[in-house]
Amino acid sequence: MNLRRLGPAAVAAAVASIWLAQGGPGAPVASAAPAKSADICPAVTVSCPDSGSEGAAASYGAEVSGGDSAVSPTFNWTVSAGSIESGQGTPAIGVATAGLAGSTITATVDVGGYSRSCSASNSCTMSVARPSRKFAEYVTNDLAPARPVLDRWLAALAAAPEAQGYLIAYGGRSSGPDDAQKAADAATDYTLNVRKVDGARTLSGVGGYRDRPTVELFISAPGAGPPMGTPTVDPKDVKPR
């Protein structure tokens, strides 16, 4: 543009136009384009227990927060060991642990449905412990402790000072709602107050119902997980006498 041929006002207007076009002070500032909803990424977390016993299913759960509310997320799980026995394609899975004592299992979930730019994946790792060894069991219709059986159990624990003892009591088909706890308390009272065994070595609990009132005794080597209750009777089928 030849500014010499323009009047003062035209020159000023032309200079201002060039100044603004080149981004000088007063020039309009371009705003960033708003993010598309598909580009809003979610946060994915995966939870699992620190450890579990071999033979018991390992549970993992995924939680998705944030992200585009219009997306219906998909879940694809992979595991470093064992096999997924339930829940593939859902937010929670169960993983078979047979033969994996002493190892770890990492479960990873990839959450789909969001923008490819989103990193919608996470994982969790748990260790698999050896299961507790069942030592003995006894039936106790009157909820009294079977002292000879308990004595043998306590002798085995004394011979293995690093081991942990567990006791699980069950009610029977005609037991009252508190009978299993009463059987557990009676056995614990004998080990604590008669045999004078440290209570921390003989942990007790209740496991539901079986055909007859029963007490199971376990010994867990160092590193082994606690035993799981194995009830055989549905509570709705129990008819207290």
Image (tube, rainbow, N blue to C red):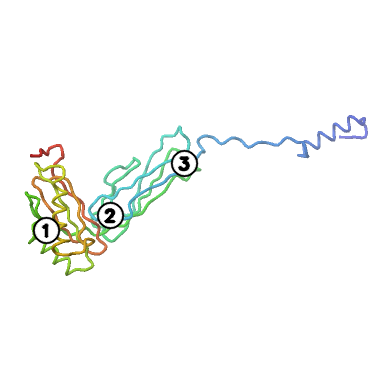
In the rendering, which numbered label is found on residue 42?
A: 3
Q: CA distance from mark 1 to mark 3?
A: 51 Å
* Relative to 31, residue 146 above or below: below
Which mark is nearer the camera, 2 or 3? 2
Q: Which residue is mark 1?
A: 136
Dot 1 amino acid type: Ala
Estimate the x, y position of residue 78 in percent, counting from the top left: 35, 49
Which of pointers 1 and 3 indicates the residue nearer the eye?
A: 1
| Callout count | 3
Query: Residue 134, located in which quarter of the rendered image?
Result: bottom left
Q: Is residue 154 left or right of residue 111?
A: left
Residue picked out by circle 2: 52
Determine contact: label 2, label 3, CB under 8 Å. Answer: no
Q: In this rendering, is residue 19 above or below 54? A: above
Residue 102 percent coordinates (x, y): 28, 61
| Mark 2 element type | strand
Going by the numbered disc 2, the residue's amino acid type is Gly
